[in-house]
Amino acid sequence: MDTNDPVREARLLVEWLRGAAGRYAWSDETDASAPRAPTPAGRPTAAGAGGAAGTTRAPVGAGIGGAAPTAPVPAAAAERDAAAPPGATTPSGGPDPFDALRADADQCRRCRLCETRSTVVFGEGPRRPRLLVVGEAPGADEDATGRPFVGKAGQLLTKMLAAIGLAREDVYIANVLKCRPPDNRPPEPDEVAACRPFLDEQIRLLDPELVLALGNPAAKALLGTDRGITSIRGQLRTLADGRRVLPSFHPSYLLRTPEAKRESWLDLQLVARTLGLSLPSRPSADERDE
Ligand code: URA
């Protein structure tokens, strides 16, 4: 992206505010027919939940902030080799640690939310994502389907990613909580603490280049701050373990507060710059009519 071209920047901002960033509708309305964004060169594309393994990566580092999980995750702790293709065994013959982590989460009864959930929403995306998006917790649609960010906020998230040339399938999408809080109430601190080891292990095993923390609970969990999202959004942090985290507004907040899309767009451009992505160019009239 040419960040020195103010005219292009201004045009993209106007398109963003109008709800038409790049070749993708970016209104709050559902547009299930929107075409997929191109896969960034050199990155594998995953198919569906769990995703497929792609290229090999450098060894994974410590969890976020280098901090130890607040409680051990037995299945994942049993095997800490680099992540392998789903269903694969590790060199020591054990189950793939990411699959083991998911299986562990599926059985989780560490907090009261297990009593009311329909499904555990572990997360989905490629096993070698460049970007990990972390939201708050599953809502009703996610609880019903077992997939993260599939409701209205999820549809907006898909459009936000598309605006910087990322297909939803290119990124891993997860939440701080893997189970829906009743009536979508905010997560309780003990629920976050109980679920935290799963997120820490996801980050460690996925080893993304950048974590996009959407909303207060995600920013608080990942950055250990009590500062509100409005004051810290857009500030790229590098944690002690070298992991980069960008806090930004949650799509649900953007649905309620459309004027905040302006800041959100700045944050998305920072995501694109951090990952070295080129923003999609403005579509021709023909393309828009596709
Ligand atoms: N909001 C979230 O934070 N996560 C979801 O998966 C859906 C809505």
Image (tube, grey):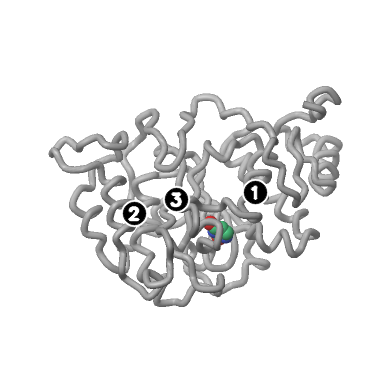
Residue type at numbered disc 3: Gly
Q: Is mark 1 within 8 Å of ligand 1?
A: no
Q: Nearer the viewer, mark 1 or mark 2?
A: 1
Q: Is residue 37 above or below residue 232?
A: above
Q: Position of residue 136 (x, y in %)?
A: 53, 63
Q: Is mark 2 within 8 Å of ligand 1?
A: no
Q: Secondary structure at mark 3?
A: loop
Q: Is mark 3 within 8 Å of ligand 1?
A: no
| Mark 1 surroundings within 10 Å by alpha-carbon count, few (fewer than 14), some (14 through 19), many (20 or more) | many
Q: Position of residue 262 (x, y in %)?
A: 77, 54
Q: Secondary structure at mark 1?
A: helix
Q: Regarding ligand 1, which quadrant of the image does it lie in?
A: bottom right
Residue type at numbered disc 2: Glu
Q: Which residue is mark 1?
A: 155
Specify which label sits upstream in the sequence, 1 or 2. Answer: 1
Q: Residue at point 80% right, 35% down?
A: 5
- Rendered image: mark on residue 123: 3
Q: Position of residue 148 (x, y in %)?
A: 51, 52
Say whether residue 149 is left or right of residue 259: left
Q: Which residue is mark 2?
A: 201
Q: Secondary structure at mark 2?
A: helix
Specify which label sits upstream in the sequence, 1 or 3. Answer: 3
Say whether residue 92 is left or right of residue 247: left
Q: Residue at point 62% right, 71% down?
A: 228
> Considering depth in this image, is 248 or 96 the residue closer to the camera?
96
Give the alpha-carbon distance from disc 2 to disc 3, as whole Å. Answer: 12 Å
Count of numbered marks: 3
